[in-house]
């Protein structure tokens, strides 16, 4: 029937097509060994990968799928730019609605696997990663303001056209993110360089002879935003702290806030495009919150709009179900000196709902210094009131953020009467006015009413991601 997806070819059919395409091996002399792919890919059912073998030798890495022309073009272009880092193309063939892309098979292992197995040290792994970056830097070329503006414009268009973002999301991006991103990208100097588009330890392979290849070229490109390599390594390397910062090579400076915002947005769009709903939602949950925090820090927060408060709306207003997420608030007290964990109390509560918290501080007398850490992650906090009492006597009553000191990790959302605060990390701190418990020991109780929302962007497009299938 017209419009139906062609049936996935069998191994025998694939071998016949290889022979037809003139694969450099005698007919019947080679076989296929299936290679595992990430099960969360949406294209898992219509893209297959094999090791082509003959006589115990690995002849090629073969990808069979639909619409592989873009991957084939990126593979060829990267091989021309970095022949000593790439697995060179060997075959490109189309038949029966399917594409066949064969490349050199590199019998190496990823850096992270070698580290876990103890066959390479962290300094050796970092030296390998740095050497790859140094080789990529050799492809660096001067560019122009017009060229970087054009690439950035295409990137913004891709975001605006993505079904992932809703109206409020786009308003936030247009007002609070895009201006700073544009200022940073256009500030120069302007250069382009090749990258594989996903520079992480799993994509740097090393063979027993010490040769290195860079794989996963699905998003390989010559780009003005090659410094994203440093962000991706730090975000996805899963190494010890000493291994999260790439060695500084050539034009790869530390990641600036605008570049982190660019990298997060690219990650959100790509994850939504290629992954099944579960991983895409997890990426949106984690990086969406981080994007708001980065936006708060760009330009000193001058561009954070007052409508951020809208983005803290509860899940019941999003038209889709979500799993409640638990968080923890903590109160510290001290009669003198710094606060410490010994003199503290914790209370768990559910994000996205109004929470009335009660902390039993025990018996105290005299002056008391109080600290409230209202949450333990990035998100938006609506603070209704705080009360401190002892044996029925009210000692302190505060409404909104009036009377509290933002001592760290919290930024007020603009608005003359806003009681909303943006938590920038996992240790936001509110310092309360000192209280006097009196001369005799009395039981002190602190109560607070608040609402904390971890998911600040709506991402309505997550409801359109189908079930499926290389999580980026």
Image (tube, helix red, strand yellow):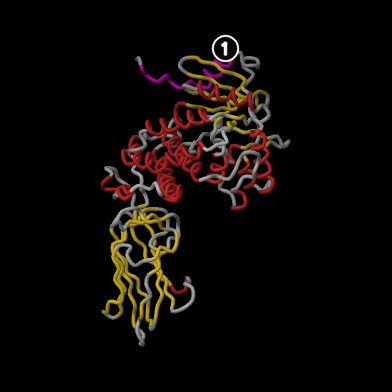
Q: Residue at x 38, y 58 (%)?
A: 327
- Residue at the far bottom: name it: 440
Asked if residue 253 is positioned above or below residue 20 in the image, the reply reads below
Give the class, few, some or many, for how many residues have Cα within 10 Å of label 1's Cα (few <14, many ≥20). Answer: few
Q: Residue at x 39, y 61 (%)?
A: 328
Q: Give residue 150's position: percent from left, percent from top.
A: 48, 28
Q: With 430 as the anchor, is 197 left or right in this view? A: right
Of residues 337 and 325, the one nearer the viewer is: 337
Q: Is any part of residue 34 visible from this angle? A: no
Of residues 351 and 40, the one nearer the viewer is: 351
Q: Secondary structure at mark 1?
A: helix
The quadrant in which residue 445 appears is bottom left
Tell me the quarter of the image containing the N terminus.
top left
Of residues 13 and 175, the one nearer the viewer is: 175
Q: Which residues are magenta?
A: 3-21
Magenta stretch containing residue 11, yes or no?
Answer: yes
Asked if residue 430 is positioned above or below residue 465 in the image, the reply reads below
Q: With 132 as the anchor, is 177 left or right in this view? A: left
Q: Is any part of residue 199 visible from this angle? A: yes
Q: With 448 as the anchor, is 44 left or right in this view? A: right
Which residue was labeled with disc 1? Answer: 20
Q: Give residue 302's position: percent from left, percent from top.
A: 40, 49
Magenta stretch containing residue 208, yes or no?
Answer: no
Q: Give residue 240's position: percent from left, percent from top.
A: 59, 52
Q: How many numbered circles does the render carry?
A: 1
Asked if residue 153 is positioned above or below residue 243 in the image, the reply reads above
Q: Give residue 423's position: percent from left, percent from top.
A: 40, 56
């Amino acid at each position: 029937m017209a419009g139906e997806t062609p049936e996935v070819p069998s191994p025998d059919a694939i071998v016949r097509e290889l022979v037809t395409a003139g694969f450099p091996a005698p007919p019947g002399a080679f076989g296929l060994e299936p290679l595992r792919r990430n099960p969360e890919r949406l294209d898992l059912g219509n893209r297959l990968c094999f090791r082509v073998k003959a006589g115990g030798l690995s002849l090629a890495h073969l990808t069979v799928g639909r619409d592989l022309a873009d991957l084939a073009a990126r593979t060829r272009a990267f091989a021309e730019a970095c022949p000593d880092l790439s697995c060179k193309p060997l075959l490109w063939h189309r038949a029966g609605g399917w594409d066949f892309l064969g490349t050199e098979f590199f019998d190496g292992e990823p850096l992270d696997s070698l580290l876990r197995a103890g066959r390479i040290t962290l300094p050796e792994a970092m030296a390998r990663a740095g050497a790859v970056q140094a080789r990529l830097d050799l492809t660096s070329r001067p560019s122009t303001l017009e060229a970087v503006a054009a690439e950035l414009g295409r990137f913004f268009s891709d975001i605006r056209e993505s079904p992932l973002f809703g109206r409020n999301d786009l308003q936030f991006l247009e007002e609070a993110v895009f201006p700073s991103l544009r200022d940073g990208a256009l500030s120069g100097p302007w250069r382009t360089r090749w990258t594989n588009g996903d520079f992480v330890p799993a994509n740097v392979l090393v063979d027993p002879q010490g040769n290195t290849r860079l794989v996963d070229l699905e998003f390989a490109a010559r780009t003005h935003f090659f410094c994203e390599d440093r962000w991706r390594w730090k975000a996805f390397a899963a190494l010890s702290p000493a291994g999260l910062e790439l060695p500084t090579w050539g034009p790869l400076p530390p990641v600036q806030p605008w570049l982190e915002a660019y990298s997060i947005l690219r990650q959100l769009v790509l994850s939504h495009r290629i992954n099944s709903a579960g991983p895409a939602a997890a990426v949106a949950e984690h990086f969406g919150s981080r994007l708001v925090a980065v936006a708060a820090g760009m330009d000193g927060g001058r561009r954070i709009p007052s409508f951020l408060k809208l983005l803290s709306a509860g899940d019941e207003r999003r038209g889709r179900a979500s799993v409640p997420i638990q968080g923890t608030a903590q109160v510290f007290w001290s009669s003198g000196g710094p606060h410490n964990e010994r003199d503290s109390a914790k209370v768990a509560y559910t994000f996205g709902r109004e929470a009335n918290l009660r902390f039993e501080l025990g018996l105290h007398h005299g002056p008391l210094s109080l600290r409230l850490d209202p949450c333990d992650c990035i998100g938006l906090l609506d603070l209704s009131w705080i009360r401190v009492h002892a044996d029925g006597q009210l000692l302190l009553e505060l409404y909104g953020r009036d009377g509290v000191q933002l001592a760290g990790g919290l930024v007020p959302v603009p608005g003359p009467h806003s009681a909303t605060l943006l938590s920038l990390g996992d240790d936001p701190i509110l310092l309360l006015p000192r209280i006097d418990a009196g001369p005799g020991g009395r039981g002190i109780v602190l109560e607070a009413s608040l609402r904390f929302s971890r998911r600040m962007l709506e991402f309505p497009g997550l409801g359109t991601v189908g079930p499926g299938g290389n999580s980026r």
